[in-house]
Amino acid sequence: MEKVIFLDRDGTINEEVHYLFRREDLRIIPGVPAALRRLKEQGYRLVVVTNQAGVGRGYYREEDVKDLHLYMNELLQAEGAEIDGFFYCPHHPVYGIGAYKQVCRCRKPDVGMFEMAERLFDVDKAASWMVGDKETDLAAGRNYGVRTALVGTGYGAGVYEEYLHKDGARPFDLYGATLMDVAEEILRRGRRE
């Protein structure tokens, strides 16, 4: 079985850009390649699961998403941080156009993209994680049955602040200000287990 780090894309790997699809707008968050490389060196598979409602809304095409992922992987591969699989949901249940307007299993917080990944990877859920900057990422990870990590980039610091003032259980198993903080804690917990 394989240990997998499922990763949100926007705000987790790259800087948040409203409906990102152009190569020239892609900015990898500083420190992310080193964190991804560290996880790969310890035997984790890296799998991106990203909602891309911009396709469903007609702002860009599925081919644009695929092209951006190829470019992103070129940048990451040059730093030893290649993503092993990209999965995206092009649908939106309310604002989608044509066939893209639908309730689907792939849109986070549902688990369809994780199930797609299972066709390529023999996922060890007990040793795998979902890492993201939004509550939908965390909910998707919980729904799939893996542990969850909230990263403070993108929207994550704001989400974390909200939970500092709430009673009750937090919807994440760990928080790190950066992806490297999250990676190091995942690896530390893995060594203990």
Image (cartoon, rainbow, N blue to C red):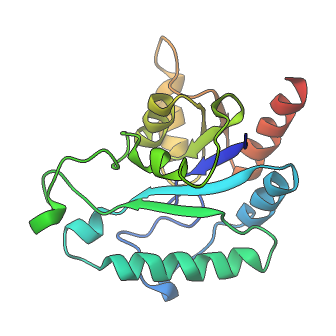
- Which residue in the rendered view is the most extreme toward the left? 98
Q: Residue furthest bottom?
A: 24
Image location (x, y in percent) of residue 117:
53, 52
Considering depth in this image, is 28 or 145 the residue closer to the camera? Answer: 145
Q: Is residue 191 above or below residue 176?
A: above
Question: Taking 25 as reference, is 147 left or right?
Answer: right
Q: Can residue 97 be seen in the rendering of this structure?
A: no
- Residue at (77% x, 51% y) in the render: 180
From the image, which quarter does the N terminus lie in? top right
Quarter holding residue 131: top right
| Left/right of residue 41 with respect to residue 44 in the rendered view | right
Q: Can the viewer see residue 157? A: yes
102 left or right of 105 in image: left
Q: Nearer the viewer, residue 4 or 7?
A: 4
Identify the residue at horizontal 52%, vertical 47% (top origin). Answer: 133
x and y percentages locating residue 170 in the rendered image: 52, 21
136 and 41: which one is in front?
41
In the image, residue 25 sits, relative to residue 131, either above or below, namely: below
Which residue: 37% across, 45% down? 108
Give the residue drawn at x 71%, y 62%.
32
Indicate the quadrant where residue 126 lies.
top right
The correct choice, above or below, for 87 with respect to 131 in the image is below
Percent of width and height locating residue 28: 63, 71
Residue 162's place in the image compared with 95, above or below, is above
The C terminus appears in which quarter of the rendering? top right
The number of numbered badges drawn on the structure is: 0
